[in-house]
């Protein structure tokens, strides 16, 4: 599902890289996007989510968001629709620096930026619950509810501890703002402490999310696995993307173990770059690698990661990360590296 803007450029070239691995996967393309919405009013066709869950093993998405659709309704219904209605509760966003040259911090090596954010993906303020009262008067009131369920908080925290175990990590840090948001934060605190007792091999840690932002910049090497709510996870993963070289480098998976999961770069549709063949395809390509690993093609996924690392070391980069190559040139280089590593 390429979607909008640069999604329509980075997804096709990332698929070429997947094909170069030889992994036995087949793709079906869907045109759900702003173009489709503006043409016939469709965001998600009837039973669209059921069809995705029934007929596919994974979903690969570019980006959704288009200045022509002021309400952003199509992006909400398609992107957030998949996350919520398909119950993809763990948004896994690895933060990995491939080369020191990409990091805006001084004296930072790749070993020092290597952690994963597990973002709750189905609750929080994203539920868009709330309302307005006395609209368009001087007394207007707006409320926005932050929804945190015991089950929702527990499953994502458990996911973070399981993820840490599976990846040989020793620390899980929960970030909240329980000093201010005492009801929601209270639930996160209580559940985190309870779940942590089941994982005696892993050290639980806590920081307020503002302090975590400081820590991410000053001492990224102290972080291994971070778990947090939907909104904080959204914000800190843009900051985290900057540590890796920018949004063009960042990959993600929207996961519900055992169900059809969705993989997408962290970046959006970048309207000013769209149609120019200049967008960095690496975030999309690394998301494809995550998808292959999730589907059981770990060796193929690793080949892609190694090829991206070679492209970075050989300076085959788009302009956002200091290079001078076009989007498809970078992707072709990576595809060739993948093919030659068969
Ligand atoms: P954005 O990620 O599109 O762009 C932010 C900045 O990063 C811009 O300077 C852009 O040029 C740069 N950038 C992003 N991806 C890049 C890439 N691959 N290569 C080089 N530079 C890149 O975020 P935005 O500008 O806040 O949002 C634009 C639209 O995308 C909005 O409609 C927004 O809602 C939507 N959006 C969608 C998703 C998604 O589909 N997952 C994510 C974020 C934003
Ligand atoms: C992201 C994006 C989305 C979010 C937007 C486009 C709704 O910023 O995937 O990080 O807020 O989750
Ligand atoms: Mn975001």
Image: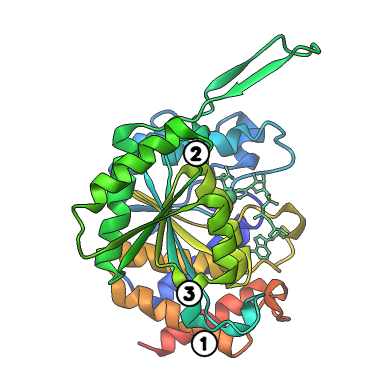
Pointers 3 and 2 in contact (C-beta within 8 Å): no
* Mark 2–mark 1 distance (CA, rounded to whole Å): 34 Å
Residue identifier under label 3: 221
The residue located at (52%, 70%) in the rendering is: 220
* Mark 3–mark 1 distance (CA, rounded to whole Å): 23 Å
Q: Return the x and y of residue 318 as percentages of the image width and height.
A: 68, 75
Sequence-earlier tag: 3 or 1: 3
Q: Badge 1: few (under 14), some or many (20 or more) residues near its Cα, within 10 Å?
A: some
**Which mark is in front, 3 or 1?**
3
- Specify how the rendered protein is coloured: rainbow
The residue located at (48%, 74%) in the rendering is: 221
Which residue occupies the foreground of this view, 8 or 212? 212
Q: Badge 3: few (under 14), some or many (20 or more) residues near its Cα, within 10 Å?
A: some
Q: Return the x and y of residue 69 as percentages of the image width and height.
A: 70, 35
Q: Secondary structure at mark 3?
A: helix
Q: Is residue 125 left or right of residue 316?
A: left
Q: Badge 2: few (under 14), some or many (20 or more) residues near its Cα, within 10 Å?
A: some
Q: Quadrant of residue 33?
A: top right
Sequence-earlier tag: 2 or 1: 2
Q: Is residue 290 above or below residue 319?
A: above
Which residue occupies the foreground of this view, 125 or 298? 125
Which residue occupies the foreground of this view, 199 or 28? 199
The answer to whether mark 2 is within 8 Å of ligand 2 is yes
Q: Secondary structure at mark 1?
A: helix
The residue located at (39%, 80%) in the rendering is: 303
Q: Return the x and y of residue 121 as percentages of the image width and height.
A: 43, 43
**Which mark is in front, 3 or 2?**
3
Residue identifier under label 2: 80
Q: Residue 310: which disc?
A: 1
* Mark 3–mark 2 distance (CA, rounded to whole Å): 32 Å
């Amino acid at each position: 599902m390429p979607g909008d803007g640069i999604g329509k450029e980075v997804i096709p070239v990332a698929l070429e890289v997947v094909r170069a691995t030889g992994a036995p996967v087949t793709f079906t393309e869907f045109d759900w996007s702003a173009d489709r919405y503006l043409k016939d009013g469709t965001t998600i066709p009837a039973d669209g989510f059921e069809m995705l869950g029934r007929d596919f093993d994974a979903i690969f998405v570019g980006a959704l968001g288009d200045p022509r659709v002021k309400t952003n309704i199509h992006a909400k219904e398609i992107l957030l629709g998949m996350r919520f209605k398909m119950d993809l509760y763990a948004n896994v966003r690895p933060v990995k620096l491939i080369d020191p040259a990409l990091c805006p911090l001084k004296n930072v090596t790749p070993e020092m930026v290597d952690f994963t954010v597990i973002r709750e993906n189905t609750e929080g303020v994203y539920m868009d619950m709330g309302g307005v009262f006395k609209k368009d008067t001087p007394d207007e009131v707006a409320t926005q509810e932050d929804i945190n369920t015991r089950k929702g908080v527990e499953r994502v925290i458990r996911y973070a501890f399981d993820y840490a175990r599976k990846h040989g990590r020793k620390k899980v840090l929960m970030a909240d703002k329980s000093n201010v948001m005492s009801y929601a934060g209270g639930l996160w605190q209580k559940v985190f402490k309870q779940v942590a007792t089941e994982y005696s091999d892993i050290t639980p840690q806590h920081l307020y999310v503002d302090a975590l932002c400081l820590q991410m910049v000053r001492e990224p090497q102290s972080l291994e696995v971070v778990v947090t709510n939907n909104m904080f996870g959204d914000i800190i993963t843009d900051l985290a993307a900057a540590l890796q070289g920018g949004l063009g480098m960042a990959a993600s998976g929207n996961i519900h173990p055992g169900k059809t999961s969705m993989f997408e770069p962290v970046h959006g549709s970048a309207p000013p770059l769209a149609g120019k063949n200049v967008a960095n395809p690496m975030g999309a390509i690394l998301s494809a690698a995550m998808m292959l690993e999730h589907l059981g093609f770990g060796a193929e996924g690793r080949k892609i990661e190694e090829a991206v690392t070679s492209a970075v070391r050989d300076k085959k980069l788009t302009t956002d990360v200091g290079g001078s190559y076009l989007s498809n040139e970078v992707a072709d280089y990576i595809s060739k590296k993948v093919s030659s590593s068969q």
